Image: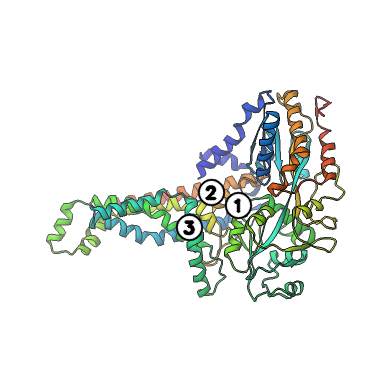
Amino acid sequence: MVGLALPLVLLTFNVNQPVSAQGSAKELIGAGATFPFPLYSKMFDEYHKEKGIQVNYQSIGSGGGIKQLENKTVDFGASDAPLSDEEMKAMPGPVIHIPTCLGAVMITYNLTGSPKLKLTPDVIADIFLGKITKWNDKRLTSLNPTAKLPNLDITVIHRSDGSGTTYVFSDYLSKVSSVWKTKPGTGKALDWPVGIGAKGNEGVGGMVKQTPGSIGYVELAYVIQTHIPSALVKNKSGNFIEASLKSISASAAVTLPADLRVSLTNTEAKDGYPITSFTYILLYEKQAYGDRTMEKAKGTIELVNWMITKGQQFAEPLLYAPLPKKAAESAMSRLKLVTFNGKPLM
Amino acid sequence: MFLTLLVSSLPSIKALGWKFIYGKTWDPVSGEFGALSFLIGTLLTSTLALLISSPFSLTIGLFLGEYYPKGWFSSLLKNAVELLAGIPSVVYGFWGIYFIVPVVRSLEMKVGVAPYGVGILTASLILSIMIIPYSASLIRLVVSMVPESLKEAAYSLGATRFEVIRFIIIPYIRSGLSAGILLALGRALGETMAVTMLIGNTQAIPKSIFDTSDTMASVIANQFTEATGNVYFSALIETGLLLFVVTTIINIIGRNIIKRFES
């Protein structure tokens, strides 16, 4: 296993170089987040049919995508979380963030009768901190008076692999709980105070399904496809919101910062579900790097432009929340900043 | 390979020093990386798996090497055991989730510990099945290589079959036996997928065999793709280096044991 890991790293770092070094705009290369992969492959397939340009997207994980972009081996990277200030500094040039769609994290559980639970931010934080340990805890029963909550231990199930889902969930908990913020904090992999880890959404979902009295967090698409129960979560305005494509898009209907590097958890949006996030395409502001041609840079911008406009129609059927109008407009104005030797590309 | 691992681990070796080995906390958020709990998890599951599987591999080896070396039944058994080695480990993992986990969970309910179903015991059980073919086929080979003249001499002195096995065959195959067990241990130490699916992936030092834990191989598999930050990335590679070193040390110890038996 050890022997396998290293050649793999070398492979992913080098394999793209010869292709992207060529000037042809017939093929574009991207790498990164796994979360939007089904949507991106659909989009790129349609794009190929429409424009005859092949887009080769490798879903190697956000971390890998950022590294590939840093090494300039891809035309664009993709990440579920915006780059931190520290990561921005490590990049060889300024990086533009273009959101392409939204995802959400839902809370699922295994209780007999699958009652529809209502949860508040502090209760969620205390369950995952291990402070609420029983299902018939007063704070849970007072929120859910009609559900018959049993005298059963709560088993917390979290992701064992580094993941954008964990990042979004922990980012939310850090915002609503000061205890969570100091420890374990926000990250793709955490030092969890309680619970057991399972790999992937299907791992967490499967483990929750199997373990009576368990609670875990998974992506929206997984919940809808597998019909597992999920909780309503109280948002910042005090409304209990069920996660749906509509309530997820609604969460982004707030004033966004100019560079779009923003966390969408716990936003002010009245009808917005509180645990959501953008997923991003990352590209360099100054496209004339390495031996890139103008043609290639233009091809990249046209593709991203298509993704946030025409490509949006493919989001909903695949259970991704499309960008709200305002966010798409801000993304467009960001894209206009991209230049090639000082000349704007759109 | 050792050098590649070492060079890539340098950033974390510099940043963490010895704390990497004795530190208990693995917290990518605060940048604290201690692999002690993974080290213990790896050694514990592998040893336990070895203890569970050794009696089975020894009996299978003796049965196929001594009792029934030929015939349709033994060739069926032999092929079945060898087939175990060919099953992908993710399939073992799935089988473990749907078969062993419920069994362990009901056991845990009877014992009165938290009924997670996954944990050290579950991972060791699946590992023990996975490593049987490695030791069993080697043991079968050395058992069948015991000279007939030795066995016949014992029989002519009035020894029973059990006595032949106990006093002739087992002493004769000692080094082959330990080599087989060592081979199995090497396999158990590095096993990744099935263990990841069944061990519970908790970064804490286990207190009992029902506790959940994590192994070096599974933490690498889990976190490698999303490891951002130099020290984090390099700490994962250093975990690989540690696994490499542990495997080497165990191999050297094993080779010395074999040598001592041979002389």
Q: Is A298 above or below relative to B228? A: above
As drawn, is A255 to the left or to the right of B191? right
As drawn, is B211 to the left or to the right of A73? left
Residue kind at label 1, given as amino acid type: Phe
Residue kind at label 3, given as amino acid type: Trp
Q: Residue B27 in the image: x percent, y percent?
A: 66, 55
Q: CA distance from mark 1 to mark 3?
A: 34 Å
Q: Residue A141 in the image: x percent, y percent?
A: 73, 74
Which residue is tagged 1? B20
The label on residue B242 is: 2
Q: Residue B55 in the image: x percent, y percent?
A: 35, 61
Sooner in the amino-acid sequence: mark 1 or mark 3: 1
Q: CA distance from mark 2 to mark 3?
A: 30 Å
Circles 1 and 2: CB distance less than 8 Å?
Answer: yes
Badge 1 and badge 2 both on one subunit: yes
Foreground residue, A227 or B9? A227
Foreground residue, A236 or A47? A47
